[in-house]
Amino acid sequence: MRIFLVILSIIISACATERVEDIRETSTGILEGEGIVIMARSYHLGNKTEASFVKCLNKELGKDLRVVPSSEFIDALFPWFEPRTAPFDTKGLPTLMERPGVAKKIAEKNVRYMVWVDGDTDKVAGGGSLSCAAGPGGGGCFGFAWWTKDSKYNAAVWDLAAMKSAGTVSTDVTGTSYMPAIVIPIPLISRTQTKACKGLADELKLFINDETNPVD
């Protein structure tokens, strides 16, 4: 049984694929004391990027960058970053900055970059079957099930000092999980969302610090 589980763990690792890309529109860089804020965009069908992913991204980025909590930033700039009033792209930034108090509040928070994140984790395939039964002599589950999830996220980086887009960073992680059951179900999970969070955070750190390929 132990050998079987080891083999399945190896299969899970082999079946997880990750792609991280960035498109740079301008040079970046961040000074000591300057911060970033992570904002969640509404995704397809009106859904919003999972709070758990945004929380993970804040934690990972916070290890190396100063991250201002989005709730604190939104409250300070009320009502200009509420879902219905937030600027959709950087074209609206100059007008927004001209509104009373907006530029002052952003300066007080010392936020240099705003990172708009969208995407989600979807189940894209699955199969197999499990059956469980109980009787006078005991019970158990037997069978084998599997499912594949795709974690796809995109981060648009806005430079609030220059009032323009710095570029985008994206990640796409696909992984297959398994649940064999010989009396007891044993879930062997491919944590695609966690892997996507770590990959996106690492690339964003490089991007913001201008350690990726510069613009020609």
Image: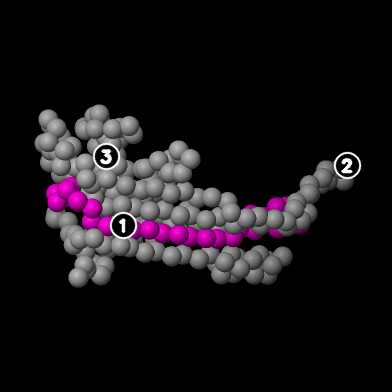
- Could you tell me which quadrant the N terminus lies in? bottom right
| Between 137 and 26, the one nearer to me in the picture | 26
Residue 23 image position (x, y, % from top left): 30, 62
Q: Is residue 35 visible?
A: no
Which label sits in the foreground, 2 or 1? 1
Task: Indicate the secondary structure of the residue bearing disc 3.
Answer: loop
Magenta-drawn stretch contains 184: yes
Q: Is residue 101 visible?
A: yes
Q: CA distance from mark 2 to mark 1?
A: 60 Å
Q: Residue at x 37, y 42 (%)?
A: 41
Left or right? Give the position of 119 relative to 108.
right
**Residue wearing tag 3:** 87
Q: Residue at x 32, y 32 (%)?
A: 84
Task: Indicate the secondary structure of the residue bearing disc 2.
Answer: loop
Left or right? Give the position of 45 relative to 213.
right
Magenta-drawn stretch contains 198: no
The numbered disc on residue 136 is: 2
The kind of residue tagged 2 is Pro
The kind of residue tagged 3 is Pro
User: Tag 2: Cα neighbours inside 10 Å, few (<14), some, or many (≥20)?
Assistant: few
Q: Is residue 48 above or below residue 194?
A: above
User: Tag 3: Cα neighbours inside 10 Å, few (<14), some, or many (≥20)?
Assistant: some
Of the residues under marks 2 and 1, which one precedes in the sequence?
A: 2
**Residue wearing tag 1:** 168
Left or right? Give the position of 108 relative to 56.
left
Which label sits in the foreground, 2 or 3? 3
Q: Residue at x 70, y 52 (%)?
A: 185
Task: Indicate the secondary structure of the residue bearing disc 1.
Answer: strand
Of the residues under marks 3 and 1, which one precedes in the sequence?
A: 3
Do the residues under discs 2 and 1 have CB atoms within 8 angstroms?
no
Instruction: Give the magenta-colored segment's residue range.
Output: 159-187
